[in-house]
Image: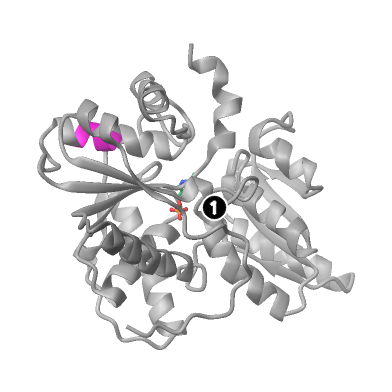
Amino acid sequence: MDLKYPPKMHFACLPTPVQYLPKLSEAFGGPEIYIKRDDLTGIGLTGNKIRKLEFLFAEAKAQNAELVITCGGVQSNHARATAIAAAKAGLRSHLMLRSSKNEAPDGNLFLDRLVDAEVTFISAEEYQAVDKMMAELADEYAKKNIKAYVIPEGGSNALGAFGYISATAELQEQLSQLGTVVDSVVLALGSGGTQAGLILGTKLLHTKWDVLGFNVCDDAPYFVKRIGKIIQDWRDTFKSNISIEENDIKIVDGYVGKGYGLSSKPELETIKEVARLEGILLDPVYTGKAMFGLKDQISQGRIDKNSKVLFLHTGGIFGLFPKKNLFF
Ligand SMILES: Cc1ncc(COP(=O)(O)O)c(C=O)c1O
């Protein structure tokens, strides 16, 4: 299908590799497990956010923005990626990060500081109105004659969804070259934009796989609604009548564990297992939880042992460092 993409900036090293994980497939005792290495989209610019930011920054530049504003948790990969992308694009960045205190610069926050992002800490309560706060901040900049471009949490909106529509096309081509067909694409779910893009991609490109999102916060009804909204906005904005049903949004709930950003022992053990067997580094907040969920679903027989699964590695490595004391 001839898909028309909006303009984008080129931040990511693409295509990211697709690899077969023989030792992990054996250890999990079931399906053939493949991985798409979106942790290798770049170095500082690692992870899934880069694909969305390529489109969002092109719009920011087209609007002559001088500064980008975004938000997230204090260790937000998205906020860090935005700050580094801003540096690369010659823009300033202002991050609204959720934290009850003035945090020491570790992990992602250290990198935010390194590239000179302006950081405002806001409480969890204030964060509930973060979209309004970011709009007000943009107004304050406007009063100083500085044009700001606001990127929503996770870069998860209609335009950002193109990141994983184009990633679907990339994956389809790679699997066809490998002569492999996968039954499902598995990923961690935080703000829903990656899964929204992947679902749109599967519909637009008629791929055969299911997209299974493991939520790392909230619950399945919340994400069905949130992803449904991004898809609806995409259809409205880009004038598409593509049909997507609620049951196309497949969420595997039950792996939030102790809560967002909090790790349990089996999750940390899974991160160690994958590092030691395959030399692949997962993160504690997103990919570690999703991989633990995948392992558990296989052991419960909920994922067919004869199927083929592709795990989308969405990055997050810098989130490992602030958690190092939990591992040993
Ligand atoms: C490493 C990592 N994986 C997965 C996700 C989830 O992606 P999304 O917010 O598009 O659901 C995020 C961000 O939230 C992330 O930083």
**Which quadrant of the structure image shows residue 254?**
top left
- Badge 1 element: loop
Q: Is mark 1 within 8 Å of ligand 1?
A: no
In the image, 84 versus 103, the foreground residue is 84
Q: Position of residue 6 (x, y in %)?
A: 53, 80
Q: Start and end of the magenta stretch?
A: 293-297
Residue drawn at x 35%, y 30% is 257
Quarter of the image that includes the N terminus? bottom left
* Color theme of the render: one colour
Q: Position of residue 58 (x, y in %)?
A: 65, 74
Q: Is residue 219 visible?
A: no
Q: Position of residue 106 (x, y in %)?
A: 69, 30
**Is 270 left or right of 307, judged from the image as shown?**
right
Amino acid type of the residue tagged 1 in the rendering: Thr
Secondary structure mostly taken by the magenta-highlighted segment of the chain = helix
Is 266 part of what is drawn in magenta? Answer: no
How crowded pointer 1 is (Cα within 10 Å; few <14, some 14-19, many 20+) is rated as many
**Which quadrant of the structure image shows residue 137?**
bottom right
In the image, 44 versus 128, the foreground residue is 44
**Is 140 left or right of 214, judged from the image as shown?**
right
> Label 1: which residue?
41
Looking at the image, residue 206 lies above or below residue 108: below
Q: Position of residue 158 (x, y in %)?
A: 47, 73
Is 295 part of what is drawn in magenta? Answer: yes
Q: Is residue 207 visible?
A: yes
Residue drawn at x 69%, y 57% is 85
